[in-house]
Image (cartoon, helix red, strand yellow):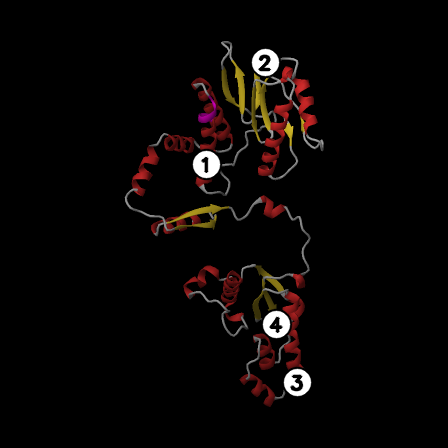
């Protein structure tokens, strides 16, 4: 078995093809294999007994860098694994194929009680049954494998009806019905990917289906997202492409904005204009004049008209988005979610219909 370090399979495959061509052309006749089959870094050979070490030594000399090293695994009791198959030599000289599982295999699959769409769970069943059907050569071995699959899935919480449903689909009973529906003239208009929320995503998928749009679902909360944080938290003021919130010290109102630049730069711009206004002496007359003026920022208007103080230290990032249009939509959502406690003059650069308000209110 060959161990490859290169991360790109396509490049590794090209290099291995070049390497094996050189090895086969230059190998001695006494250790020349009668069969050589390779898939990326796994090879299967048939050769004379006692010549395995000689062939391995020869192949390991072909690569001048010494980065590629072959190791081998001999046939044991008439059996040898290759990829996902276990090749078994029969008494009559023929061979049969079984599924190969490593000794460390635990038969742990996606639990049926997990927060995933049903078709993801049915996909697990379909994959296991497909492997059994396409790899195993004898019917009696296939029956044993299906029993093993049912036992393993039952330990993962899969009910009997889920396995029967997939078996019926594989036999073509359900597929024929779906084909007849497609042949009725229904055309797909596109596909959308939505985060999976139990019962909500299924209902949304049915709505999309009525309009000829197919849906794919993906989990939005995973153990990796929750537990793995490989990077240190960036400095707040260095973060770019964000939606931010700035509160007022004197009242409960907040300002929400978006920027493609760093938050620190945007805060300095806000603070500079507010400081210029704050330096004025606010009499009743100046307050009346300020109430009629419109400054560049709604924060400045709020300070000028109410003589309030902004809490710059409490400014925070509430969303991240690199695409400008999507970031403006997120800004609108957060502005609408604040209700009456917003100090913004408008609803942002991009506005949605107010029918969405009750979905995004926070």
Quarter location, residue 73: top right
Residue that numbered label 2 is attached to: 77
Between residue 348 and residue 245, name the one nearer to us.
Answer: 348
Between residue 333 and residue 27, name the one nearer to us.
Answer: 27
Q: Is residue 48 left or right of residue 153?
A: right
Q: Which mark is nearer the camera, 2 or 1? A: 2
x, y percentage for residue 72? Answer: 65, 22
Sequence-wise, the earlier of marks 2 and 1 is 2
Work out which quarter of the rendered image holds the N terminus and state it.
Answer: top right
Sequence-wise, the earlier of marks 1 and 4 is 1
- Could you say which disc has been placed on residue 123 in the image? 1
Q: Which residues are magenta?
A: 132-136
- Could you say which disc has been placed on residue 280 in the image? 3
Question: SS of the residue at dot 4?
Answer: loop
Report how far apart the C-alphas of labels 3 and 2 lie in the structure.
94 Å
Q: Residues within 10 Å of mark 4 (few under 14, many from 20)?
A: many
CB contact under 8 Å: marks 1 and 4: no
Does the magenta portion include 206? no
Report how far apart the C-alphas of labels 3 and 4 lie in the structure.
19 Å
Report how far apart the C-alphas of labels 2 and 1 lie in the structure.
35 Å
CB contact under 8 Å: marks 3 and 1: no
Which residue is at a point 63% across and 88% down the rendered structure image?
283
CB contact under 8 Å: marks 2 and 4: no
x, y percentage for residue 121? Answer: 47, 37
Sequence-wise, the earlier of marks 3 and 1 is 1
Report how far apart the C-alphas of labels 3 and 1 lie in the structure.
68 Å
């Amino acid at each position: 078995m060959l161990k490859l370090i290169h991360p790109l399979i396509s490049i590794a495959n090209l290099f291995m093809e070049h390497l094996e061509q050189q090895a086969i052309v230059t190998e001695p006749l006494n250790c020349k294999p009668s069969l050589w089959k390779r898939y990326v870094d796994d090879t299967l050979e048939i050769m004379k007994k006692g010549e395995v070490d000689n062939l391995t030594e020869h192949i390991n000399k072909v690569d001048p860098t010494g980065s590629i090293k072959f190791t081998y695994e001999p046939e044991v009791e008439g059996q040898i694994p290759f990829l996902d198959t276990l090749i078994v030599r029969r008494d009559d000289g023929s061979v049969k194929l079984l599924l190969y599982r490593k000794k460390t295999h635990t038969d742990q699959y996606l639990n049926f009680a997990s927060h995933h769409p049903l078709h993801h769970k049915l996909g697990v069943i379909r994959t296991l049954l497909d492997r059994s059907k396409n790899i195993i050569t004898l019917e009696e071995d296939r029956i044993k494998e299906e029993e093993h699959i049912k036992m393993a899935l039952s330990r993962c919480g899969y009910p009997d009806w889920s396995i029967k449903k997939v078996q019926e689909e594989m036999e073509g009973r359900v597929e024929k019905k779906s084909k007849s529906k497609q042949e009725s003239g229904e055309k797909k208009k596109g596909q959308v990917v939505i985060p999976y929320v139990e019962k909500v995503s299924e209902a949304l998928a049915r709505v999309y289906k009525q309009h000829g749009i197919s849906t794919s679902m993906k989990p939005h909360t995973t153990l990796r997202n929750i537990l793995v944080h490989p990077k240190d938290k960036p400095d707040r003021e260095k973060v770019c492409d964000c939606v931010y919130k700035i509160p007022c010290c004197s009242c409960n109102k907040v300002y929400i904005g978006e920027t493609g630049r760093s938050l620190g730069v945007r805060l300095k711009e806000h603070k500079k204009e507010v400081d210029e206004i704050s330096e004025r002496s606010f009499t009743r007359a100046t307050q009346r004049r300020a109430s009629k003026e419109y400054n560049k920022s709604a924060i400045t208007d709020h300070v000028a008209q109410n003589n309030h103080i902004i809490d710059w230290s409490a400014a925070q990032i509430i969303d991240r988005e690199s695409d400008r249009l999507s970031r403006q939509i997120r800004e609108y959502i957060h502005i609408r979610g604040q209700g009456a406690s917003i100090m913004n003059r408008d609803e942002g650069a991009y506005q949605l219909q107010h029918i969405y308000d009750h979905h995004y209110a926070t």
